[in-house]
Image: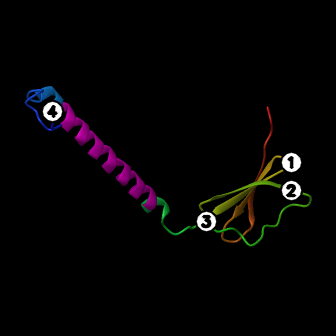
Amino acid sequence: MDMDDTSEYGEEPPNLRFLRVLVTVLTATMIAGVVIIIALIVIRYGGKDEFTLPDGIALPEGAEVSAFTKGRGWWAVVTEDQQILIYDAGTGELRQSVQVTAD
């Protein structure tokens, strides 16, 4: 008995044919979407890394670093005594000091 013999089961219903085409189109759309998302991630993060660390920062006497972050044109150092020190990225000079108070 041949599995492709449609005479035993009759003609394929139109709704089943539509569903088969719909699933195929959805699969192709999902594959294309995943490929596009991967391409966008590669394009976005594949560029030159512009994050440069300073050679050295002059901290106040007795200050211990808890965290470090970088913005456009500045660096920020959070110390263990809850102080944020903001330095100029070009010159390395202290721009601002902010004391953080816990409420």
Instruction: Give me the C-alpha separation between circle 2 and circle 1.
Output: 8 Å
Work out which quarter of the rendered image holds the N terminus and state it.
top left
Which is more N-terminal, label 1 or label 3? 3
Q: Main secondary structure of the magenta part?
A: helix
Amino acid at the residue labelled 3: Phe
Q: Position of residue 83 (x, y in %)?
A: 80, 49
The residue that appears at 82% across and 46% down in the rendered structure is 82
Q: Report the Cα–Cα distance between label 3 and label 4.
A: 55 Å
Q: Which mark is residue 64?
A: 2
Residue under numbered circle 3: 51
Check if mark 2's residue and mark 1's residue have beta carbons within 8 Å. yes
Say above or below: 18 vs 29.
above
Instruction: Say which of 10 and 56 sits in front.
Output: 10
Circle 1 or circle 4, nearest the eye:
4
The kind of residue on which mark 4 rests is Arg
Residue 25: name its quadrant. Answer: top left
Q: From mark 3 to mark 2, how far is it between C-alphas?
A: 23 Å
